[in-house]
Image (spheres, grey):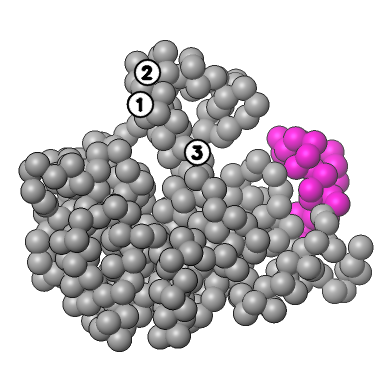
Amino acid sequence: MMSTQLKTRLHYWLAIKRIPRLASNIKINLVNQYGLSGLFDLSSSALSALGLNGNQVTAILSPDYASIESTIQRCHADKITIVGFDDDNYPALLKETANPPVLLFGQGNLALLNQPQLAIVGSRSATISAREHAKTFAMQLSQSMVITSGLALGIDAAAHRGALNAKRYTIAVVGTGLDIVYPARNKALAIDILANGGAIISEYLPGTKPKPGCFPKRNRIITGMSFAVFVVEAQLKSGSLISARMALEQNREVFAMPGAINNPQSKGCHSLIKQGAALVDQPSDILSLLDFPNFAGLYRSNSPKSNKKVEKTNQQSLFIDPLLSSVDYEATSVDIVVSRSNLPTEEVLTRLMALELRGLVTAVPGGYIKMN
């Protein structure tokens, strides 16, 4: 084990990240209460009294500092910066969300993380016209703000490329370790983002391979860092609509581009517009609908107190998830939640994931439990 003198704040943050099956917001609350290093000085009984289970207590009492040091050295070799929750580069707006990551891994110009950002998201299998629109909007809007997206095929890639074509900045938030580019065909795009002063970030350790559950989770980072989300094209059941719901929960503005009424790829955007999202068909719409100087000030201040949130009660109420009442404070199986809610299993699983990301439920053996 490393000597106490050699432990740094990064060792502690990585140890906190490794605490199993504990929501990020709870980890951060523990650090706020006991201090970054102080948490690791608590006794087994004190940790158990906090409601932590045996595996969680062990992870705090006996961190694998050899593995943690290996991660730090691997990041150094791959030019990956570890940004802890208390780091100046950690995005100020992301800190204010319900379940922010305890740390981020970043490459490139990390000063962008606290610059005004607009998230542009949409379908991976987007139509040609939608990809062109995303690129055009990103080219123009990147003159005023950083374009943030997820490095996926379709709309994401078009948005990144639009900002690059305008010789402006873009941030990619990925669902893998930063030593893996997924999808592989976007490797050239990732290289161009870094070469042109942009940034790529992830909450996942180097070596983390693409898994389906990682990508909905990374969406909360895309929306959390941004003051608004622009959905260009999306189906009714898509990750982009999950992002829109997250954005509303994070008190962000949501914009949507309309499309042809017979195009299934546009039905998600049409649904958002019906439910209160602002209809956008030209870049100037976004700038005119936002009080942009005030939004930009949120980033310059880097202070939670500066975020004068706009009330969007009517919009947010459209996305209140009724499944929460179907989950008990003891393990509730997915089948029971399906039965109580009268919703399809696929939709229940999607909504449960959204609730888990908000820290309202947590997955346990046998199903889910409601959090206090």
Q: Over which residues does the magenta segment extend?
A: 37-62
Question: Which quadrant of the structure image shows residue 371?
Answer: top right
| Quarter of the N terminus within the rendering | bottom right
N-terminal label among 1 and 3 = 1
**Residue visible at 59% across and 62% down in the picture:** 177
The vertical placement of 340 against 5, above or below, is: above
Q: Is the magenta stretch mostly helix, strand or loop?
A: helix
Q: State if disc 2 and disc 1 touch (CB < 8 Å).
A: yes
Question: Which quadrant of the structure image shows residue 306?
Answer: bottom left
Count residues near mark 3 (Cα–Cα under 10 Å), then give few for <14, some for 14-19, many for 20+. many
Position of 49 compared to 28: left or right? right
Position of 222 compared to 65: left or right? left
* Residue 16, horizontal then vertical, whole percent: 70, 55
In the structure shown, which secondary structural element does the residue marked by tag 3 occupy? helix
CA–CA distance between discs 1 and 3? 14 Å
CA–CA distance between discs 1 and 2? 8 Å
User: Label 1 is placed on what type of residue?
Assistant: Pro
Identify the disc placed on residue 322. Answer: 1
In the structure shown, which secondary structural element does the residue marked by tag 2 occupy? helix
* Residue 192, horizontal then vertical, whole percent: 42, 80
Q: Which of 344 and 351 is in front in this view?
A: 344
Identify the disc placed on residue 341. Answer: 2
* Residue 12, horizontal then vertical, whole percent: 74, 63
The vertical placement of 6 against 325, above or below, is: below
The vertical placement of 137 against 192, above or below, is: above
In the rendered image, residue 89 lying in the magenta stretch gets the answer no
**Residue visible at 61% across and 75% down in the picture:** 80
N-terminal label among 1 and 2 = 1
Q: Which of the two discs, 1 and 2, sits closer to the camera?
A: 2
* Residue 226, horizontal then vertical, whole percent: 35, 64
CA–CA distance between discs 3 and 2? 17 Å
User: Label 2 is placed on what type of residue?
Assistant: Ser
